Image: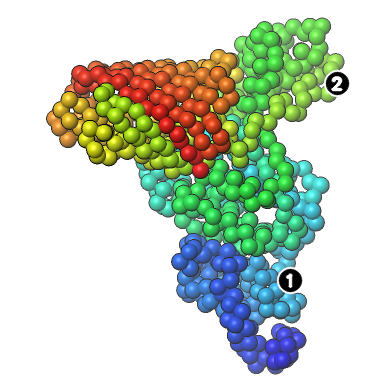
Amino acid sequence: MVLALLLSISLAAEEPTAQPLYLQELKERSDALGLHSHEYWAVLLHLDGRGRSRVDDAAFFLAENGHRDARAELHATLAGLLQAEESVHENGETATILDRFPARAEWLCQQLGIDPQGLPNYPASEVEELITHLGPGARVYLVFPDAYMNTPASMFGHSLLVIRPAQANPLLAQAINYAAETGEDGGIRFAVRGIFGGYPGYYTLMPYYQKVREYTDMDQRDIWEYELNLDDSEVRRLFLHMWELRGIASDYKFFSENCSFNLLYLIDAARPGLNLHRQTRPWVIPLDTIKLVHDADLVEDFHWRPSRLTRTRHMAQQLSRERRRQAIGLAKGSLTATEFAASDDTHADAQVLELASELLQSLRARKKISQGDYQQRLFPILTQRSHIDHDGPAWPERIAEAPPGPELGHGSARVGLRFGQYADKGIVEIEARPAYHDLLDHPHGFVTGSQIEFARLTLRYYDQEKRLRLHNLDIVDLWSLSPIDAIAAPPSWRGRIGMSTLPTGNGLRKEINGEIATGASIVYGPLLMWLMGQADGRTFRAAPHHDIGIGGDTGIIATPYHNWRLRARLQAGTGISGSSSTWWRWSVDQRIQLSKQLQWDTRIERGSRFGEQATVWSSGLLFDF
């Protein structure tokens, strides 16, 4: 065949006319095979369902219309493979096609039977050198740092990939991270731009230990590491495609094209045919990505890496009150190392000093003390510890058993159906929630005391009116109940923005409302209790058109059994502008988890608003998926 003859011709041959003929033959062959519509080519170009690339950087494409014409981009890539000259990036850097797009080049060579050694500039020296450094047996991990409520972009957690060479220390591995460059933006500007793709997102490669320090020490977030069962060839494909994306920008969208979604393209590139990026919902949450990868049988093993705060709290719980007081005093400076009186129990003494060292490092990581105070306290503690005759560390490396993994948590989306009564009216409530967790949900895989709900919609049917009406729309409803203890005392807070329709003696009252509160919470055994001060505001059509008030919020959540949670709550407030009316409401809820997807929910509440009192109760099933 002519193709076989042409494939045997060296691309460095003396006859210059051979190259155009060879390129034309490759284009015709690729068209006949339909490579431009192949699902793997779609993965390499990050194509969506309409055939347009989700990559927004022109430097990622060789053809002028390559972002929406997969065939043109494939032909341009073939032409580039046969060029000895380097191409120019938009940033002015030059590189050969083998250096810029090694994953594309390798796949096209395999599909078209091209001998890569016959290509100009073979091999791509830099990327091949790095792959050689990885060596055989390199492992890939999908890493999930859990939610961090104090940063909007991290409220759902995060995900990244880690590549660890065989026999290397896990912390010496390289982390592949996809994140937005947001600059100094914050507040409303940060939220709006983040939701609608106003920030560029980039893939970066950095030492994993830097990310561990950021998450576990500074942000106090536990980390889950899922080892993927990728073989050497799959690790190679993942690395080659990551290499293609260096310095390439795409619009970062907090709820869709985010860290979790874009990492799926790397996994899909590693194992052709997975197409995990096509199995996501319109909104993509890191927790759902973990479950997606787990359900695809990609997970071989997992490891839990507790944050420094989690570790120190477990350590403190195992000491007596007096020993715990000593460790805290050493860390905070109220007790000096020279004042610490050694006892006959050298093991306990060593535990106190090591806990003090951990606490001190946690304070420094969270910038609670200066570098000077840190050094002034730490050196005497370590010196005192070295004088204690106790071989080896006083605390085991694994200080606590790993909690249930995030993949075991309930689904983030929900639909529900309840039946009940409002005053003397029968009601039916229909609920839908795209994301993602509330305080009464089972806590497996979620941060205890946190609630993140977006766009939770409740429709209510009143049997006397025979109409289905909007009852409530929580645009956003956030809680962060961070327990105060001897180790840390973070503030608790909550915030909500929504719309409600309330029946009154004068008919239905529609309002747009918001609340913000802050205070403190504590844990006592199976009980979580809080007390907060709050401010609230609402607007409505009827005069006086607005109501601004202040008040308080207190409650308790109990867990009598692992699948049964109870909550009692009391709120009260008074208006300071607008209607200036006082109001109060108490409620009792229970949630019983019947299965991973199904929960039984019951609620009763009584309250007074606008001079009217009413009792409401409802009960029904919630389905999470």
Question: As shown in the figure, which amino acid type bears the numbered disc 2?
Answer: Asp
**Residue 374 screen position, x and y as percent:** 64, 23
Q: CA distance from mark 1 to mark 2?
A: 53 Å
Quarter of the image that includes the N terminus: bottom right
**Which residue is the site of mark 1?**
123
**Is residue 415 shown above or below 603?**
below
Which one is nearer the viewer's eye here, 228 or 337? 228
Label 1 Cα crowd, 10 Å radius (few <14 / some 14-19 / many 20+): some
Question: As shown in the figure, which amino acid type bears the numbered disc 1?
Answer: Pro
Query: Which picture quadrant has residue 287?
Result: top right
**Which residue is the site of mark 2?**
391
Query: Which picture quadrant has residue 243?
Result: bottom right
At horizontal 51% and vertical 27% (from top left) the residue drawn is 592
Label 2 Cα crowd, 10 Å radius (few <14 / some 14-19 / many 20+): few
**Residue 352 screen position, x and y as percent:** 72, 15
At horizontal 70% and vertical 26% (from top left) the residue drawn is 400
**Residue 480 screen position, x and y as percent:** 47, 28
